[in-house]
Amino acid sequence: MSEAWNGLPENPERDGWHWIIFGGVMQAPWLWSSSSQVWAHDSGPWKPEDVYPGFIYLGPCLPPAEVAALRAEVARMRDGIGKALDEIADAGPKALKYAEQELRAALASEPRA
């Protein structure tokens, strides 16, 4: 994110944890309260307008189930790439064309969550 952050999270109408960098190097999860429109932090509540210009908003924290689904998807993709590489090694040019098609299709597809 290159422009200054306005202090609001993605989807400010929803409560949730979000990753924020502050002090230039410290990354930590902050809790957003949609009802009171403040950040809850161990140093107390912060209003969006009180966020320092040096703070950087990274995005919402993913819930454990979403992280697990993404890890499973990465594992499936790695397995598919490994199989494609094995086919290339075993069958030569014919397999190379097939593997290329499969890899391009995998890269073009949306990750499943």
Image (tube, rainbow, N blue to C red):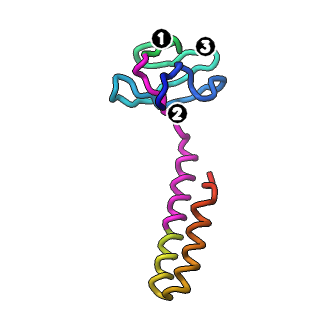
Q: Which residue is disc 3 drawn over?
A: 36
Locate residue 47, reporting x and y percent. Answer: 52, 12
Q: Residue at x 51, y 76 (%)?
A: 83
Locate residue 86, reporting x and y percent. Answer: 47, 80
Secondary structure of the residue carrying numbered label 2? strand
* Magenta stretch bounds: 53-78
Give the distance between the C-alpha atoms of the residues marked 1 and 3, in whole angstroms: 14 Å
Q: Which residue is disc 1 drawn over?
A: 50
Marking on residue 93: none
Secondary structure of the residue carrying numbered label 3? loop
User: The residue under label 1 is which amino acid type?
Assistant: Asp
Vertical comparison of 24 with 77: above or below: above
Vertical comparison of 113 with 52: above or below: below
**Residue 73 falls within the magenta-colored stretch:** yes
Q: Is residue 46 left or right of residue 109?
A: left
Q: Residue at x 50, y 62 (%)?
A: 75
Q: Which residue is disc 2 drawn over?
A: 59
Q: Residue at x 56, y 79 (%)?
A: 97
